[in-house]
Image: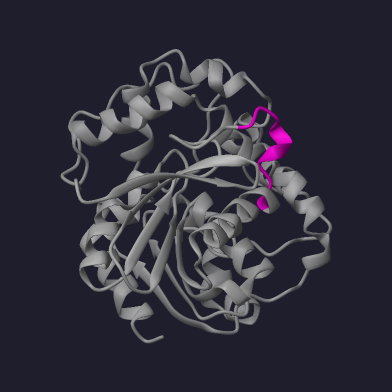
Amino acid sequence: MEKIEHTTVATNGINMHVASIGTGPVVLFLHGFPELWYSWRHQLLRLSSRGYRAIAPDLRGYGDTDAPPSVTSYTALHIVGDLIGLLDKLGIEQVFLVGHDWGAIMAWYFCLFRPDRVKALVNLSVALMRRNPAVKPVDGFRALFGDDFYVCRFQEPGVAEEDFAQISTASLMKIFLTRRSAEPPCMSKEGGYRNRPDPPTLPSWLSEEDVNYYAAKFNQKGFTGPLNYYRCFDLNWELLAPWTGAQIKVPVKFMVGDLDLTYHVPGVKEYIHNGEFKNDVPDLQDVVVMEGVAHFINQEKADEVSEHIYDFIKKF
């Protein structure tokens, strides 16, 4: 870990913290919520040892990267703009792209906007969410799961932040990272996270040191920037109207755990396995469903995920 270099790069009007290691073809890793560059620590070391230059930024609003105050500064156009600016500053023409959770969502957008900059994509947990011109995303989630669904609860600025502040950030991180239920996460206005007990013991893949690293960074930055990604769900839907029906035109491998809540959203399994996913992503080359694995797949099954990434990108 001490060989990982940390730099700050000015891009798209913000200063972005970037962790990197190795030389060779570039693999760009995009983290999700509530994560950091640190979520890719295992993959950075493994891929760099295989002859790649592995780069993992803290995305806008996270960790040691700037967090603009406006909710509307967290759209897909901003995030992908940050990343294109980063590559330009580093003199990198093309990358292998790897995303997880919100990082996966942004990776899909990246490939939609700038396929010329992507050699191939490995996405984890979140399949492509086809734009439905008739239904805004938050309305869709509300219709499926009700007002208490976490995405709906996260919409009003300040509400989730106040709830999160009722318990220690370390406890909150343990609750998030160790969740193993495929049931939709819901938080009532009254209950929230404050009454949830810590997991009795941490799983083997997550240490107290890991939890404390996340907690320290989120204590320093807060949760507003990360939550603003959710608050831009509908704004992204509006801005992306011109791309309705557009296909992803890069080679893709998709991986998900069979205990991942994203895999159990109604209609998602059918979308992935019945041909629609392949229609939207014509060069979808591989779909891997890992048994007994939950949402934070890149940390829970770090070695296997690293090997899957390597086995795919080495072909190009």
Quadrant location of the C terminus in the rendered image: bottom left
Is residue 156 left or right of 201 when viewed as pictured?
right
Question: What residue sits 51% from the left and 18% below the top?
Answer: 163
Q: Is residue 74 magenta-colored?
A: yes
Q: For residue 169, what is the image quadrant?
A: top left
Check residue 85 for magenta coloring: no
Residue 292 visible, this orientation: no
Residue at the (39%, 45%) spot, across then down? 7
Return the x and y of residue 156 as percentages of the image width and height.
68, 26
Above or below 71: residue 84: below
Pick out the residue farthest to the bottom.
315
Q: Nearer the viewer, residue 291 or 15?
A: 15
Q: State the residue in front, 261 or 309.
A: 309
Highlighted magenta segment, given as a residue range:
68-76
Give coordinates of residue 291: x percent, y percent: 29, 63
The residue positioned 58% from the left and 80% from the top of the image is: 278
Relative to 157, say whether 116 is above or below.
Answer: below
Q: Residue at x 73, y 37 (%)?
A: 72
